[in-house]
Image (spheres, helix red, strand yellow):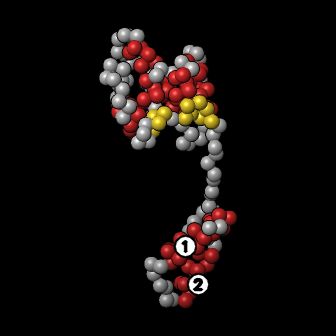
Amino acid sequence: MDIFNLDQALIERYESFARSFSEIRAPEIRAQIDAAYNEQRFWPEPLITINPRFEVGHSVDQLVAQEVLDPALSKIFAAGPDRTPIKLHRHQDRAVAKARNGESFIVTTGTGSGKSLCFFLPIIDAVVRARRAGEPQRTRAIIIYPMNALANSQLEELEKFIGGSGLEEELRPTFSRYT
C-alpha cells in the first residue's frame, strides 16, 4: 500500500462507487456531471492526521508500589482477559500526583488521550481509601458531561473497570448517571 497516495486511491474508489448507481445517456447532462466530478464537488480535500504517541507514565502497579494509589486500583484499572493493570500516560501520572497532593488541575489534550482517567483514578482512589478507613458512604464527586452520549460512554467504562475488578463489595465504589 502506498500511503502517500492513499487519499487519491480512496477518492477514486468512492467516485467509482458513486457513479455506479446510474448511467447517464444524455451527452449534455453527462458532460455536466463529469465536470462536477472533475471539480471534486462531491467530497472535500481529505484530512489525514496521525495520532500522537503520548509520553509514557507509570503503570497503576508502580503507583500502588509507591503508595500513591491504593492497592485496590490495580484490580480496578486493569484491561484485557488477564486483567493486566494499565500503564498511564505522563499527563495522567501528573494529574494523579496533583490530586494526591490536594492540588487542583486542568487537563487539555486530544481525543482518546485518556483525560477521563485523569479524574477517575484520583476519585476512585479517594473512595476506596475512605471505605478502608470506615468513613460513611457519601457523594464524593459529581462529574458533569456536555452530552448524554459521552455520559453513557463513561458510565460503560466505569462499569467495565469496576464491575470486572472482582473487588470486595465493601470497597467497591458506587456510581450513577442522572439526566
Residue 137 percent across, percent down from the top left:
35, 15
Identify the residue shown where x is 63% and y is 40%.
54
Q: In this rendering, which labeled residue sits more in front, label 2 or label 1? A: 1
Q: Is residue 55 visible?
A: yes
Left of 61 or right of it: where is 1?
right
Element marked by disc 1: helix
Q: Quadrant of residue 22?
A: bottom left
Identify the residue shown where x is 35% and y is 30%.
166
**Eyeballing the image, is 45 above or below 122?**
below
Residue 168 percent across, percent down from the top left:
33, 23
Left of 174 or right of it: where is 69?
right
Q: Which residue is mark 2?
A: 31
Residue density around tag 2, few if under 14, some if 14–19, many if 20 or more, within 10 Å: few
**Eyeballing the image, is 94 above or below 7?**
above
Residue 160 percent across, percent down from the top left:
38, 37
Q: Which mark is residue 13?
A: 1
Q: CA distance from mark 2 to mark 1?
A: 20 Å
Element marked by disc 2: helix
- Disc 1 marks a residue whose amino acid type is Arg
Identify the residue shown where x is 58% and y is 15%.
101
- Disc 2 marks a residue whose amino acid type is Ala
